[in-house]
Amino acid sequence: MANEIMLSLGDYRFAITTAAYQELRRTSEYRWAPMHRIAHRVSLQYVGQSTEEIHLRGTIYPQYKGGLAQLDAMREEAGKGQPLMLVTGLGQNLGPWCILEVGEEQAIFAQQGVPRKIEFSIRLQYFGPDAEQPGASAEVSTFPPSVASIAPFLATPPPLQPMPADLSQNPPGITPVQLSSAFPPPPAA
């Protein structure tokens, strides 16, 4: 049975004799940010790889092998809420992946509504790099940031000038404002 395995996702095994997929589609997205330039066309700058997804489509014949519980087993893996290791039948470890969607279509029914043919689809997305890889870790901070963490980025305020002991004097750098006589004084109460 080990040589029949097409793909292993966590504890679930896609195999020729059970849930064999007939179609595997893998898409990888790459991010390019527009760079606006004066008097030139916008150019693009590569800023890294984005999401990667695998879509599987296949058919299960429950009366042949594997039974009706195969999709339940797929949903059980998805319900763990954890990334699952994806390994090909050739032993290539593709890393951690998450199940985003499990779909099924039933056809050719027997007594009591038991399907003789179940077409399934699964959508997987790559979880992310391991912490050991360079650039894979990110710090998570609380919001709002503490003043100590942003202090190096703040502009240094000018030093405070001491207040004169005699307040009748003007502090250095402050010019007194002369009131204009164009306005009459307020009426006396």
Image (cartoon, helix red, strand yellow):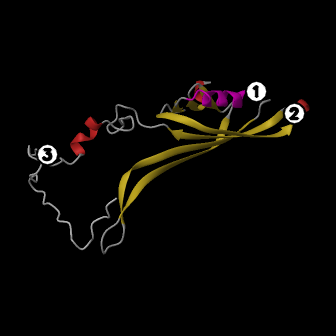
145 vs 179, left or right, is right
Q: Please identify the quadrant where the C terminus is shown.
A: bottom left
Q: Secondary structure beneath disc 1? A: loop
Quarter-of-image position of residue 129:
top left
Instruction: Pick out the residue farthest to the front.
Output: 189
> How far is mark 2 from mark 3, CA to CA?
84 Å
> How far is mark 1 from mark 2, CA to CA?
14 Å
16 vs 136, left or right, is right
The residue that label 1 is drawn on is: 67
> Between disc 1 and disc 2, whose residue precedes?
1
Q: Amino acid at mark 3?
A: Leu
Of circles 1 and 2, the one toward us is 2
The residue that label 2 is drawn on is: 113
165 vs 26, nearest the viewer: 165
For disc 1, the neighbor class at 10 Å (few under 14, some 14 to 19, many from 20) is some
159 vs 144, left or right, is left
Residue segment shown in magenta: 65-81
Of circles 3 and 1, the one toward us is 3
The residue that label 3 is drawn on is: 160
On screen, residue 16 above or below 34: above
